Amino acid sequence: MYGRKVKLRFIFLLLALIILSLSTFLIIKSLEENVVYFQSPTKIKTLPEIEKKKIRIGGMVKKESILVKEEEVKFIVTDYKNEINVIYSGVIPNLFAEGKGVVAEGFLKDRNLFLATKILAKHDENYMPPEIKKALEEK
Amino acid sequence: MFKYFEPNKIFSITSRAPKYVLLLFIIILSIGLTEALILSPEDYKQSHSVRIMYVHVPAAWICLGTFSVITFLSLVGYTFKIRNFFLISKSLAPSGFVFSVIALVTGSIWGKPTWGTWWAWDARITSMLILALFYIIYLIAWRIYDNDDKAFKVTSIITILGIINVPIIKYSVDWWNTLHQPASINILSKSSIHISMLYPLLIMTAAFALFSLLIFLMKYNTELIKIKNKGLDRL
């Protein structure tokens, strides 16, 4: 139905798309560790050794775990399987709260203690007016 | 059929369309902005900074959609040698680029009060930056190769490279741990955005789509005039 040239061009584009997708996939796969913005407490527990370089951990701030002492904040980051204690002193973002997502940047002291140099609050995908939130909580 | 279309006939339509599109855009934008900035409620957690979302999300949608359309037209146009498809792609790119920049800038403005940082090299944000760069490369390619077969070839390849990035942007928040939150609006499952916030979002999307259409028509008309000036009665 179509000419030979049309078929050739189509095959050329298709091959280009497949090859380039595959290369992109392989590149991203090999860079997986850098693509991931933060690691979960579970991942930290399974680390073969504790590295000295700066890393980011993330998860939920455990309920009733925030302890403010003078200049220091202590809290527990959890992914509901494993937990890690975090110590931090510095500016806390407004949305930092118990039961909400958090990303901490800093250094691992050991598998249970993380010394944060920066804290970012993670926002979840829920958007609603305050009244609705209240109604939901009352339910 | 597109091979033998007449630019004069198309031009007589597209040259009259912009003023109507502009009028419609102004109306929809006013409604959208009133809804988004005044009538819609504040968020329970982020309070008024949620209003940035009404610009950020539509801009991101439009720039992703525009790139997908550009790619589709380029690949079909390349396979079947339809020059008009390339003119349409070329004319779509500027507004797509503008929206990718808007999405990045508003995201940054939102990120500061919410996350506590202007910028994070997480997968979603980085892949979005890459899309903006692809728009730039695409536009530059048209500058370098002016409306000849080489331009069609080069820009098609650029769109193939760029389109691989589009699903990465979409699913980056599901595949990897990112600072950016996952999608709130799902076509198949229940959306996690309240209906009172969804309406202004959709109206703003319509407004931005009209803006894209407006810029596209203006750019497309320029291309048609260029062809007419060259004395060609068809593409």
Image (cartoon, coloured by chain):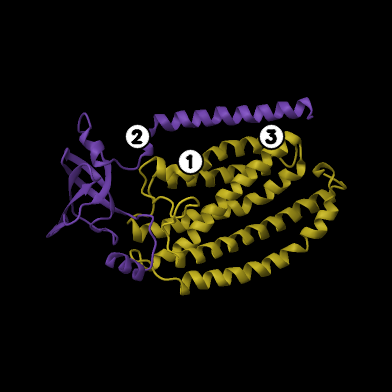
Chain colours: A purple, B yellow
Q: Position of residue A79 (x, y in %)?
A: 25, 45
Instruction: Where is residue A19? Give x, y as percent.
Output: 56, 27
Element type at mark 1: helix
Exactly how many numbered labels are in the figure?
A: 3
Kindly give the residue lying farthest to the front in the view shown: A139
Give the numbered dot on residue B168.
1
Amino acid carrying mark 1 in the image? Ile
Q: At numbered mark 2, what does the secondary structure look like: helix, strand or loop?
A: helix
Q: Residue at x 47, y 56 (%)?
A: B105
10 Å crowding of disc 2: few (<14), some (14-19), many (20+) = few
Reading the image, the residue beneath label 2 is A33
User: Mark 1 or mark 3: which comes first in sequence?
Assistant: 3
Asked whether the residues under the numbered discs 3 and 2 touch, taking CB atoms below 8 Å apart as contact, a structural biologist would say no
Give the letter of the chain under mark 2.
Answer: A
Q: State left or right for residue B192 relative to residue B222.
A: left
Mark 1: few, some, or many residues within 10 Å (few <14, many ≥20)?
Answer: some
Judging by the rendered image, the residue that carries numbered circle 3 is B153
* Residues at discs 1 and 3 in contact (Cβ within 8 Å): no
Q: Nearer the viewer, residue B88 or A83?
A: A83
Q: Given contact means CB atoms under 8 Å apart, are the residues at marks 1 and 2 in contact?
A: no
For badge 2, the amino acid type reads Glu
Q: The C terminus of chain A appears in which quarter of the rendering?
A: bottom left
The image position of residue A82, as x and y in percent, is 20, 42
Mark closer to the observer (1, 2): 1
Dot 3 alpha-carbon crowd within 10 angstroms: few under 14, some 14 to 19, many 20 or more: some
| Residue A132 position by quadrant | bottom left
